[in-house]
Image (cartoon, rainbow, N blue to C red):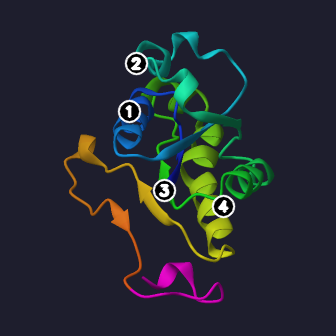
Amino acid sequence: MPRALITGIAGQDGAYLSKWLLGHGYEVWGTLRDDKPLAQSPLHALGLVDSVHVVIADLRDRTSMDAAIRSCQPDEIYNLAAQSSVSRSFEFPVETGQTNGIGVASLLSTLRELAPLPAFFRRPLARFSVTLPMCHRQRRPRSAQESLWSF
């Protein structure tokens, strides 16, 4: 059974991706930034709270993300965690940069150290009308020493 880790699982996109992956036979894990109850989450509305494994990990904290990835050992990682509120991004620009920029770079750096390397997917930039490929997957085996940035 393939195993997927979704950062930002408690959001709308994370919940619907969880539902889709569960329907395709995946074991689904997800990260939450803190241990707030999922009662207000789309996961709860879709009846998925008991179907997914949740770990507390903050994209801005490499240690917690390392621990989440190592405990889950995913075949695929879907990065949906982001500061997506425009007003909050203006109010807290440093936090936004740490989450949306440095956090992602840190996550990719962690993945570079794993062997075998899980597939990494990111949220497309559809809201800006930019079409980018969603999947970053090597077509050939890769050793842990090769650069993650070389594909």
SS under mark 3: loop
Inter-mark Cα distance, 2 to 1: 8 Å
Q: Nearer the viewer, mark 3 or mark 4?
A: 3
Query: Which is nearer the N-term, disc 3 or disc 4?
Result: 3
- In the image, the segment drawn in magenta is 140-151
Name the residue furthest right: 63
Q: Residue 22: x, y in percent?
A: 41, 39
Q: Which mark is on residue 106?
A: 4
Point out the tag, 3 or 1, that comes first from the N-terminus.
Answer: 3
The label shown at residue 46 is 2
Going 40% across and 27% down the picture, which residue do you hit? 12
Distance from disc 3 to disc 4, alpha carbons, whole Å, reads 24 Å
Check the image and name the residue furthest to the top: 39
User: Label 1 vs label 4: CA separation?
Assistant: 27 Å
**Tag nearer the camera, 3 or 1:** 3
Amino acid at pointer 3: Pro
Relative to 105, does residue 48 appear above or below in the rendering?
above
Residue at mark 1: 19
Residue 110 is drawn in which quadrant?
bottom right
Q: Position of residue 105 (x, y in %)?
A: 60, 62
SS at badge 1: helix
Say what amino acid the circle numbered 4 marks. Ser
Name the residue beneath numbered marker 3: 2
**Cα distance, mark 2 to mark 4?**
31 Å
